[in-house]
């Protein structure tokens, strides 16, 4: 086998591997949204301050606002509006806790990964949709870990408190901008399309392989 033919085979294999990786990554990030009330309206928006070390903010969630058409066994995801102060370079980390009755789970986030004025998805592996919709005692806590002033991110608040209210005298009558979703890790239709695409790609490679050999022999 000539070196040119070997390079072409390696190229095909590399493209296939990249194709499979891209599809797998896309599938991992797909989800179904919960049928909640609409996201809190953006009324009189105000940032809650930099999430620096020692920062703590607790948001009560209105259980009556949560309805769902998602399967009860799905994992819960929070979508919360954050900001990074006009895309400046931020450092440090912070945490978001979701408390559902006696259940609690914390997810740590890096400030450098937060996009400006966009919803960040935070998924909780141990809190399911069924936990969310049946437990009246729900709240979110944002905690600063090691962020410093001038290089930390923030969260947006609104005067629309239909989904709950921040428990603070400073932010009384305000709510974080958030919604809930369900992480869907059971997508047979999508997986079938992935398998079909992979098999199609392999078929093309196998059909092209004899032609490549024939061309090399001429």
Image (cartoon, rainbow, N blue to C red):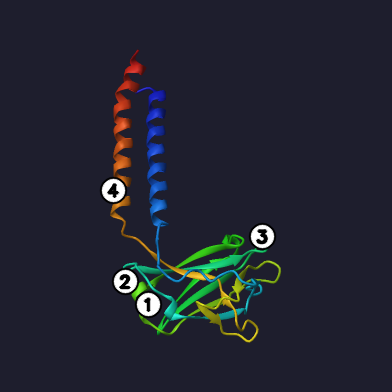
Report how far apart the C-alphas of labels 1 and 4 lie in the structure: 31 Å
Instruction: Find numbered disc 3 in the image and state the secondary structure of the residue it sits on.
Output: loop
Which residue lies under the disc numbered 3? 89
On residue 133, which mark appears? 1
Q: Is residue 76 above or below residue 62?
A: above
Instruction: Find numbered disc 2 in the image and state the secondary structure of the residue it sits on.
Output: loop
Task: Tell me which residue sits at (29%, 27%) in the image.
Answer: 207
Q: Nearer the viewer, mark 1 or mark 3?
A: 1
Instruction: Find numbered disc 4 in the image and state the secondary structure of the residue it sits on.
Output: helix
For residue 211, what is the image quadrant? top left
List x then y, in percent, for residue 27: 38, 53
N-terminal-most mark, 2 or 1: 2
N-terminal-most mark, 1 or 3: 3
Using residue 105 as the reference point, say whether residue 131 is left or right of it.
left
Q: Nearer the viewer, mark 4 or mark 3?
A: 4
Q: Nearer the viewer, mark 4 or mark 2?
A: 2
Is disc 2 in contact with disc 1, using a CB cutoff of under 8 Å? yes
How many numbered marks appear?
A: 4
Using residue 153 as the reference point, say whether residue 38 is left or right of it.
left
On residue 72, which mark appears? 2
Task: Tell me which residue sits at (60%, 82%) in the image.
Answer: 173
Task: Tell me which residue sits at (29%, 45%) in the image.
Answer: 195
Report how far apart the C-alphas of labels 1 and 3 lie in the structure: 38 Å
Task: Tell me which residue sits at (40%, 67%) in the image.
Answer: 34
Q: Residues within 10 Å of mark 2 (few under 14, many from 20)?
A: some
List x then y, in percent, for residue 97: 49, 76
Report how far apart the C-alphas of labels 4 and 3 lie in the structure: 41 Å
For residue 30, what is the image quadrant? bottom left
């Amino acid at each position: 086998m000539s070196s040119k033919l070997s390079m072409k085979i390696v190229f095909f294999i590399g493209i296939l591997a990249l194709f499979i990786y891209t599809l797998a990554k896309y599938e991992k990030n797909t989800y179904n949204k919960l049928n909640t009330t609409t996201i809190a309206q953006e009324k009189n928006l105000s940032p809650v301050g930099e999430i620096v070390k020692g920062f703590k903010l607790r948001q009560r969630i209105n259980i009556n606002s949560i309805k769902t058409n998602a399967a009860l066994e799905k994992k819960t995801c929070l979508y919360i509006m954050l900001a990074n102060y006009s895309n400046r370079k931020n450092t440090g980390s912070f945490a978001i806790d979701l408390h559902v009755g006696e259940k609690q789970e914390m997810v740590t986030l890096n400030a450098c990964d937060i996009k400006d004025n966009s919803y960040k998805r935070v998924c909780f592996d141990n809190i399911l949709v069924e936990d969310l919709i049946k437990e009246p005692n729900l709240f979110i806590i944002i905690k600063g870990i090691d962020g410093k002033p001038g290089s930390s991110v923030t969260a947006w608040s609104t005067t629309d408190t239909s989904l709950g209210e921040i428990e603070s005298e400073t932010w009384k009558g305000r709510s974080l901008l958030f919604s809930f979703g369900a992480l869907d890790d059971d997508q047979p239709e999508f997986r079938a399309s992935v398998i079909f695409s992979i098999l199609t790609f392999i078929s093309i490679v196998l059909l092209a392989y004899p032609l490549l050999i024939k061309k090399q022999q001429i």
